[in-house]
Amino acid sequence: MEKITRLSVLFVAMSALCMSASAATRQEKFVKTTISNNKIAIFSKSYCPYCARAKNVFKELNVTPYVVELDLRDDGGEIQQALSILVGRRTVPQVFIDGKHIGGSDDTLEAYQSGQLAKLVGQTDEDELR
């Protein structure tokens, strides 16, 4: 009887582990798909001032990014974990342009101030004069 109980506990633990690995794989796929399907993707939290700063930079450029507000999703924590595995940071925002990781708020602001961000989103000097 004790052997059956141990096996049952082991089975339940293994099942939970497989289900959480499956969820992690699903979230990693979501992150990669979101990044590849959108010219600009920002993983954000709606209340975060650093996220707001990064999103405002794109407003200044008159460009609309695809934004995933992690705090407004049931699976936001899992997506954030998948992001941390992908980019090595757990913080938000995380900004991607054409599949390339730009970084967080400071990185995005720095790229904006240097003019590099405008180039990355396909704006030329002529666009800025309009």
Image (spheres, helix red, strand yellow):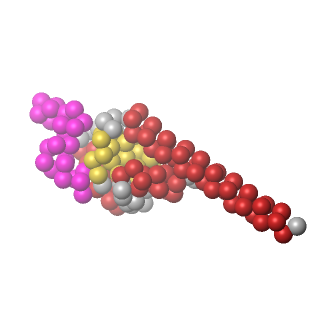
Residue in front for this viewpoint, 60 or 94:
94
Query: Is residue 73 in view from this perspective?
Result: no
Q: Is residue 127 magenta?
A: yes
Where is residue 66 shown, x and y percent of the image? 39, 40
Residue at 77 percent across and 66 percent down: it is 6
Residue in front for this viewpoint, 79 or 15:
15
Which residue is most to the front?
3
Which residue is most to the bottom?
2
- Where, by quadrant of the figure, is residue 39 drawn? top left
Residue at 11 percent across and 33 percent down: it is 125
Q: Is 117 on the left-hand or right-hand side of 90?
A: left
Q: Is residue 72 magenta?
A: no
Where is residue 42 shown, x and y percent of the image? 37, 46
Residue at 64 percent across and 51 percent down: it is 19
Q: Is 7 on the left-hand or right-hand side of 82?
A: right
Where is residue 50 shown, x and y percent of the image? 32, 59
- Where, by quadrant of the figure, is residue 116 drawn? top left
The segment highlighted magenta reads 106-130
Placement of the C terminus among the 4 image quadrants? top left
